[in-house]
């Protein structure tokens, strides 16, 4: 089956697939603490958030999170312990294994970094909470 036919499955019936956003979902970028030091700006913004959803940030909840992250121009990362992943990468976010009650740090660097962190924190703490 060609890719375009598979892509139709990803969109609700009657809607088209935004391939630019789809690429954003599937891009996997792992930034270790050492690698990110040179890539993050000095004026980046951080915010700690507690995962209130009882199943954590998995599957469909992670996809809502990635959709929100992709709506901002800033570079955004999710940090759990010593691991830091691109917040616009579904594989990256899922690989962190973020569970209920854990606190993660959101990091943003760019023109809309404050708005990005506010939007993501609101999503995690209010809209994705059970």
Image: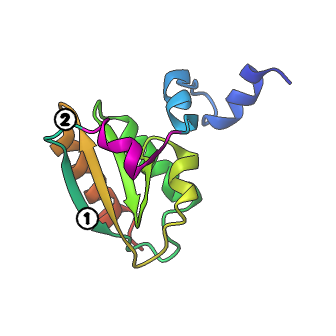
Sequence-wise first label, 1 or 2: 1
Q: Residue at x 55, y 34 (%)?
A: 27
- 32 within the magenta span: yes
Q: What x and y, as percent, mark residue 42? A: 16, 40
Q: Which residue is drawn at 31% across and 61% down?
A: 105
Q: In the figure, 72 relative to 121: above or below?
A: above
Above or below, 71 relative to 99: above
> Residue at horizontal 48%, vertical 77%?
54
- Between the C-alphas of marks 1 and 2, the distance is 18 Å
Query: Which image quadrant: the N terminus?
Result: top right
Dot 2 surroundings within 10 Å: few (below 14), some, or many (20 or more)?
few
Residue at the limit of the structure toward the front, as seen here:
34
Residue ID at (52%, 61%):
96
Residue that badge 1 annotates: 48
Q: In which quarter of the image is residue 67?
A: top left
Q: In which quarter of the image is residue 35?
A: top left
Front-lying residue, 55 or 87: 87
In the image: residue 95, left or right of residue 121: right
Q: In which quarter of the image is the C terminus?
A: bottom left
Give me the disc on residue 109: none
Q: Name the residue under label 2.
A: 112
Q: Is mark 1 on a helix, strand or loop?
A: strand
Look at the image and give the residue range highlighted in magenta: 29-40
- Crowding near pointer 1: few (<14 within 10 Å), some, many (20+)? some
Query: Residue 60, position in %: x, y?
Result: 56, 55
Q: Which-is-in-front pick, marks 1 and 2?
A: 1
Q: Is residue 33 magenta?
A: yes
Counting every numbered tag in the picture gives: 2
Display colour scheme: rainbow
């Amino acid at each position: 089956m060609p890719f375009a036919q598979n892509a139709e499955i990803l969109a609700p019936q009657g809607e088209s697939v935004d391939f630019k956003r789809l690429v954003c979902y599937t891009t996997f970028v792992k930034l270790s603490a050492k690698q990110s030091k040179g890539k993050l700006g000095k004026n980046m913004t951080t915010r700690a958030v507690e995962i209130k959803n009882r199943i954590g940030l998995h599957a469909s909840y992670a996809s809502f999170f990635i959709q929100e992250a992709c709506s901002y121009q800033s570079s955004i990362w999710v940090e759990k312990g010593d691991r830091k992943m691109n917040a616009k990468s579904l594989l990256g976010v899922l690989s962190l294994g973020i569970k209920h009650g854990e606190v993660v740090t959101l990091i943003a660097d760019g023109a809309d970094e404050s708005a990005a962190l506010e939007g993501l924190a609101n999503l995690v703490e209010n809209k994705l909470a059970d």
